[in-house]
Amino acid sequence: MTLTSPLENALEDAVSAHLGRTFPAAAICALHDDAVLIERAWGWIDPESERVPVTPETRFDLASLTKLFTASAFLSLVSEGRAALDAPLVSVIDEFGGAPRPIDGGQDPFSKAMLPAPPDAAARRVDPARVTFRHLLTHTSGLAPWRAVFQAASPHPPAAPGHAESIGREIKWAQAVAALCSYPFVGEVGSAVRYSDLGLMLLGEAVGRLHGETLDRAIDARVTRPLGLSSVTYNPARAGVPLDQIAPTEHDPLWRKRRCWGEVHDENACGVGGVAGHAGLFATARDVALFGQAWLDAGSALPIAPDVRAEATRLQAESNGERRGLGWALKAAVDSMAGERFSMESYGHSGFTGTSLWIDPTRRLVAAILTNRVYAGREGDGVHGFRRAVHDALAGISASESARRS
């Protein structure tokens, strides 16, 4: 369709309010009734010199949107009968089992400091054999949200793209898995929603073992190649993607001592070689939207059975205002990043770098919003209001289009 002026104006207002303040680069692709509603890009790859503009072909660090691709690969294995949602994780990763583990408070992802344990932690133990794949997908495993896995993977910071690593990716990942299989829990299995990167790192390892290849190859074979998503890749700079086609993220003065550009921003993903189940993928907004459209259409290109798809997008767990499906977040009743006008049937996910994908089956609307909001640091929170404004604008114009056609 031809982009209508109300949508153009609303998006320009939303972007102009945040461009240069919340993020230096943004790309949006929205699909409505299987057609492109908008595909636009704003800002600069190099905001200091403003020589290289962002285009719809620019790839962004997807951060936790990677989890959706990992979950989709796993659900395809469930659809084939090669995995079961309620099977224990130890049925695939047997080294995750063993003696009951203690409970502690976890670790702060910013300061890296250990957090205080619950008052009764000393008297409690958790049996790791109770953790199922459903627990991982709903973030109810009791695993910590974050640990410094990158420090367990290697004592050395990763080499910059284009330079050889001192330790191979396979060794780093093996050491990371050993650590992931030994950390204490932070709560009882199934007791509450606690968003956990660790759970999706373990799910990624399970996907690789079940598929019979590494996680990146499993996702390529089961998700991105069947859907024709050619921009979706791990380690884009090492894969040969020019830097002027990749949005940079944060300057890391402490560990990498360089700006993250063409390598994943997330420390744990970077520390294990750039390939992990919780973060690491890069893509264009168009390919993220097409991935969302594949979930909305429930076509055969994405090999996930209809009953498994339905299970993934229905409410599985809810606590502390979070509503979870399998891999997907469901719209929250209050202050959802999906905005006011997306229906309560909508589902999606966000990424720490400033990315998001939301799907409204009621409106037949898919919205992929990619930014590099961590370019100037991790503290800013303006991207939440930006997402809500964009989603409300897209929902409004899609409703107008539907009314016009009826």
Image: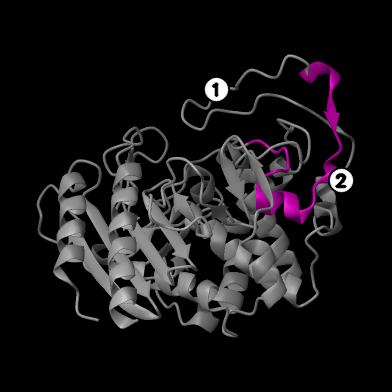
Name the one closer to the observer, 228 or 5: 5
Name the one closer to the observer, 346 or 214: 346
> Quadrant location of residue 219?
bottom right
Name the kind of residue labelled 2 in the image.
Ala
Q: Are marks 1 and 2 in contact (CB under 8 Å)?
A: no
> Quadrant location of residue 93?
bottom right
Measured along the vertical axis of the image, is residue 97 above or below residue 381?
below
Name the one closer to the observer, 333 or 48: 333
Which quadrant: the N terminus? bottom left
- What crowding class fits label 1: few (fewer than 14 Cα within 10 Å), some (14-19), or many (20 or more)? few
- Give the residue number, with chain letter if any, for mark 1: 113
Label for residue 281? none
> Quadrant location of residue 153?
top right
Counting from the top left corner in percent of width and height, residue 397 is at 27, 67
- Give the residue number, with chain letter if any, for mark 2: 129
- What crowding class fits label 2: few (fewer than 14 Cα within 10 Å), some (14-19), or many (20 or more)? some
Decide whether residue 143 is among the magenta residues: yes
Visible residue check, residue 255: yes
* Local SS, label 1: loop
Left or right of residue 392: residue 165: right
Name the kind of residue labelled 1 in the image.
Ala
User: Which residue occupies 57% across, 42% down?
Assistant: 322
* Local SS, label 2: helix
Left or right of residue 193: residue 65: left
State which region is magenta: 121-144
Decide whether residue 322 is among the magenta residues: no
Residue farthest right in this picture: 99
User: Which residue occupies 60% across, 37% down?
Assistant: 145
User: Which residue occupies 59% across, 37% down?
Assistant: 146
Left or right of residue 69: residue 53: left
